[in-house]
Image (tube, helix red, strand yellow):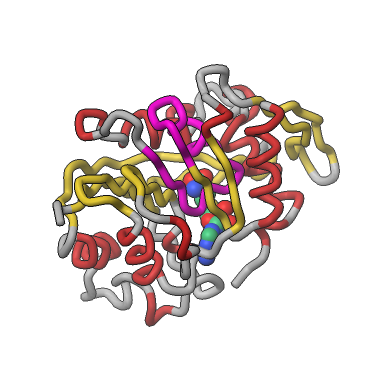
């Protein structure tokens, strides 16, 4: 498994993806600006407010530098963010504690521009905490949550089916699972026999694998395409479209 998520370059990309401004994230007016602010949009567009109880709790698995977890704090009284990367978790916790982190964005080659990344004022930072944990074996002490989020995580793990089941087990009956994935299957993260479909031309796609696992215990409530854009440097961007879905757990 790649350890890039501890690197300075990936920290820069994820701080920009999570907290960057529009002109840094996409400096070209002709570029896909509607793909910016992905972690906030996941919460704004996917969270099913009509089935969210008062005093709701939330878990964000694979939270990276924490923007979705912080966005969830606007609606949930307690939010836990988990990630395998110590560097990401330290940064996310610094965001919650201080409200900002200083780093840089990549321009070209070794040219970097310093930036201060800040948590939006609407977030209730005191409601959010972060810890290192493995989505393949979530800590026993976690309990269950009204909202579990897994954004662009499953195709970055060695066993996406197991990852899904770990997340599913942490949802309270009647609670919601917010899932997004671009199904970017790569052998560096996931051996091909563990991909959820897409094994050959005739096989099922990732969605079929996801739906087969989830529909045993959950009902599909919502599904939409969600673009997102990661800036590598001032003239190179990764534009992707995640398959986003929201699943409500059957009552016990
Ligand atoms: C593609 S990023 C998505 C981050 C964030 N959810 C977002 O949408 O911007 C994948 C994240 O999953 C984390 N991750 C990968 N494998 C993990 C695992 N086994 N357990 C927990 N986190 C993991 C990485 O460190 C990284 O932060």
In this rendering, position of residue 207 left or right of residue 42: left
Where residue 98 appears, x then y in whole percent? 71, 28
Check the image and report above or below for 160 versus 252.
below
Which residue sits at x=38%, y=53%?
Answer: 181
Where residue 249 appears, x then y in whole percent? 20, 52
Which residue sits at x=40%, y=39%?
Answer: 227
Where residue 124 appears, x then y in whole percent? 52, 25
Tell me which corner region of the image, top left, top right, bottom left or bottom right, holds residue 210: bottom left
Question: Of residues 203 and 140, which is closer to you in this image?
Answer: 140
In this rendering, position of residue 93 left or right of residue 213: right
Q: Quadrant of the C terminus?
A: bottom left
In this rendering, position of residue 186 left or right of residue 27: left
Bounds of the magenta span?
57-79
Which residue sits at x=58%, y=26%?
Answer: 28
Residue that lies at the very extreme toward the bottom in this rendered image: 193
Where residue 155 appears, x then y in whole percent? 44, 63
Residue that lies at the very extreme toward the right in this rendered image: 110
Residue 228 lies in the magenta-colored region? no
Asked whether residue 236 is in view, the answer is no
């Amino acid at each position: 498994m790649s350890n890039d998520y501890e690197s300075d370059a990936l920290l820069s990309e994820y701080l920009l993806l999570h907290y960057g401004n529009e002109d840094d994230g996409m400096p070209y007016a002709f570029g896909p600006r509607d793909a910016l602010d992905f972690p906030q949009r996941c919460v704004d567009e996917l969270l099913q407010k009509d089935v969210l109880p008062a005093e709701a709790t939330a878990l964000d698995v694979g939270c990276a530098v924490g923007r979705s977890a912080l966005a969830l704090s606007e609606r949930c009284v307690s939010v836990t963010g988990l990630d395998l990367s110590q560097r990401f978790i330290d940064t996310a916790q610094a965001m919650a504690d201080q409200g900002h982190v200083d780093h840089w964005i990549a321009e070209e080659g070794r040219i970097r521009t310093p930036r201060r990344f800040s948590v939006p004022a609407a977030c209730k930072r005191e409601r959010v905490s972060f810890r290192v944990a493995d989505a393949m074996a979530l800590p026993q002490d976690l309990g269950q949550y009204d909202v579990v989020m897994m954004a662009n995580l499953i195709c970055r793990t060695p066993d996406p089916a197991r990852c899904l089941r770990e997340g599913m087990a942490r949802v309270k009956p009647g609670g919601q699972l917010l899932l997004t994935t671009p199904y970017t299957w790569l052998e560096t993260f996931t051996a091909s026999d563990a991909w959820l479909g897409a094994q050959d031309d005739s096989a099922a796609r990732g969605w079929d694998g996801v739906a087969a696992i989830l529909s045993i215990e959950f009902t599909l409530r919502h599904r939409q395409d969600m673009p997102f854009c990661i800036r590598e440097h001032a003239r190179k961007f990764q534009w992707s479209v995640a398959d986003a879905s929201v699943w409500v757990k059957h009552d016990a």
